[in-house]
Image (cartoon, rainbow, N blue to C red):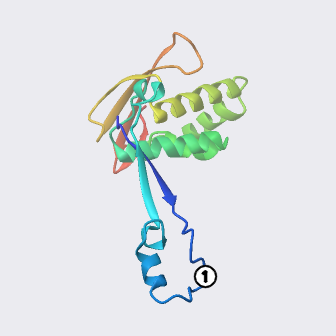
Amino acid sequence: LCHLASIVTVDTIPTRNMGKKSKRPGRDKQAAASPGTATSAMETLTYPSDGPSEEELNSLQTTSASLQAKLDQLTELALANDRANFVRQFVPLDLSPADMEGYLKDLTTAPEADGQWTNLASEIAAISAGKGVDKIEGDQVTNAIFFFQHPLLKGCDREVSFVCTGGEWRAEG
C-alpha cells in the first residue's frame, strides 16, 4: 500500500501591472523581479498523508496487471448488466458454444437467474477491488485462486480460480 502525500497546485495571481504599463522608467523590470508576480506563477503545497484508509488496509488485489485488467473489464460488463458479453469474457476458452449458451441462459432466463447474476457480479466486483479477499494462491502469471468472503452473504467463504491461456485470463472449469 502506498502512503502518498496530497499535492495541491495553486496559481498565484499577480496583484499589480495587470495589463497597464507604468509610465515610470525601470518600474516594469522591478515589478517582474518581485515575488508574487507572473515569474512565480505556480507554487506547490504538500500535505502529509494520514496513511492508508481502512478500505485499503482490508483489501488484497492481484499483482498481475493483465488479470486486474480482466477483472476490471468483467466488473464493467457486470455493472452495465451486459450478461452476454460478460459470459463470453468469463467462461473457459475450451467451453463448447452449447455450454456457453446454457450458462448464459442460467444467468438470464432461468428461475434463479437474477439471484445467480447478482451473486456472480458482486463476487467479481469484490475480487477486482480486493474487498474481502483473504488470500490469493497461484503464481498470478498462469493461475490465481482468490479466497474471499462473499460480499452479500455473511459467513459465506468463496473461492474463484482463474487461469491464463495464451495471454487470456478466464475462469477455471
Identify the residue at horizontal 33%, vertical 51% (top origin). Answer: 166
**Which amino acid, by three-letter code, is at mark 1?**
Gly
Identify the residue at horizontal 55%, vertical 37% (top origin). Answer: 99
Q: Count residues near mark 1 (Cα–Cα under 10 Å), then give few for <14, some for 14-19, many for 20+.
A: few
Does residue 97 appear anywhere in the picture? no
Residue 36 in picture, x, y percent from top left? 47, 65
State the SS at label 1. loop
Residue 8 in picture, x, y percent from top left? 47, 51
Would you identify the image quadrant in which residue 83 lies?
top right
Which residue matches tag 1? Answer: 19
Identify the residue at horizontal 47%, vertical 31% (top origin). Answer: 127
Does residue 7 appear anywhere in the picture? yes
Identify the residue at horizontal 60%, vertical 19% (top origin). Answer: 152
Q: Nearer the viewer, residue 7 or 73?
A: 7
Query: Is 130 above or below relative to 47?
Result: above
Residue that protrudes farthest toward the top in the picture: 155
Residue 31 in picture, x, y percent from top left? 47, 76
Would you identify the image quadrant in which residue 111 lies?
top right
Q: Quadrant of the N terminus?
A: top left
Q: Quadrant of the C terminus?
A: top left
Would residue 14 appear left or right of 49 to someone viewing this image? right
Residue 116 in picture, x, y percent from top left? 63, 25
Q: Nearer the viewer, residue 88 or 8?
A: 8
Query: Is 81 above or below relative to 115?
Result: below
Residue that protrudes farthest toward the front in the picture: 24
Q: Nearer the viewer, residue 1 or 36?
A: 36
Query: Is 132 above or below relative to 89?
Result: above
